[in-house]
Amino acid sequence: AQSVTQLGSHVSVSEGALVLLRCNYSSSVPPYLFWYVQYPNQGLQLLLKYTTGATLVKGINGFEAEFKKSETSFHLTKPSAHMSDAAEYFCAVSDESKGGKLIFGQGTELSVKP
Amino acid sequence: KAGVTQTPRYLIKTRGQQVTLSCSPISGHRSVSWYQQTPGQGLQFLFEYFSETQRNKGNFPGRFSGRQFSNSRSEMNVSTLELGDSALYLCASSSNSPSTDTQYFGPGTRLTVL
């Protein structure tokens, strides 16, 4: 069975600092991996996804993530945090064996200090 | 292109009642998935419909049901509501396969059971 673990339920950074949100997955097959962002009282918005090909994936709003098979990781980074980045971030893996449903991590709430 | 819409946005019910939530996918999308989001359990998959057929189902009791219409609009129904059903219910649509095609989420319906 596939699973996702996000390290740190809450991360706080200063504006302009590096953002690093950690995600490790468990999968018996090549995974499809996703990062979503959720702002208060809103649904989920896709930041980026990895299916196949290049392991460094660039997404929207300056975010990127690197798929590292050997470490079973898919960490999300952004070089310089902006106040508008404050939100909850979810890492997810697609479970091919179960028709492609998304399995989400527990989420990481990102705070950005001025 | 219009995004995924969900109605109503907010709903208050009492225990024992039933409720129907509606989701209109992005035009042209044939797959609709439903997720339940709670602080304790996080994001959990309910079911997925494709071309009016339930293609995949999560681990929820039979009180949770859904359907999809010929225009791809979907409804989910929860009967005999319990306090624990209070949650944000999210709908997501994708072109065909939720595993490979990007899932686009609606803003959600927040259900409160008193």
Image: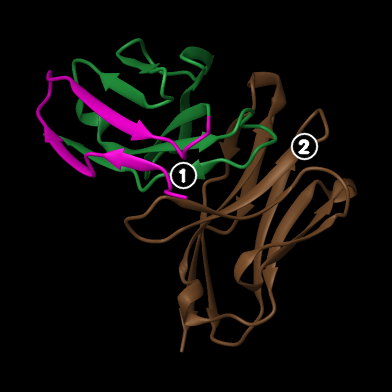
Chain colours: A brown, B green
Q: Which residue in the protein does label 2 denote?
A: A31
User: Residue drawn at (47%, 38%), measured in percent from left and top?
Assistant: B27
Write the residue at 66% across / 68% down.
A63
Q: Quadrant of residue A101?
A: top right
Left/right placement of residue A105 relative to residue A109 reads right
Does B18 appear in magenta?
yes
Left or right placement of residue B83 versus residue B93 in this view: left
Magenta-drawn stretch contains B106:
no
Residue at 66% over, 39% down: A93
Gap in angstroms between the C-alphas marked 1 and 2: 21 Å
Query: Residue B73 at what x, y percent from top left?
Result: 38, 27
Secondary element at tag 2 = loop
Q: Position of residue B6 (x, y in %)?
A: 31, 40
Which of B64 and A73 lies nearest the eye of the viewer? B64
Is disc 1 in contact with disc 2, using a CB cutoff of under 8 Å?
no
User: Which chain is home to disc 2?
Assistant: A
Taking A53 as reference, is B91 above or below it?
above
Q: Which residues are magenta?
A: B1-29
> Helix, strand, or loop for circle 1?
strand
Please tell me which residue lies in front, A24 or B87.
B87
Residue at which label 1 appears: B105
Instruction: Give the crowd class for mark 2: few <14, some 14-19, many >=20 residues within 10 Å.
Output: many
Residue shown at the point (65%, 37%) measured from the top left: B101
| Nearer to us: label 1 or label 2 | 1
Q: Is residue B3 above or below residue B41?
A: below
Kind of residue sitting beneath label 2: Pro
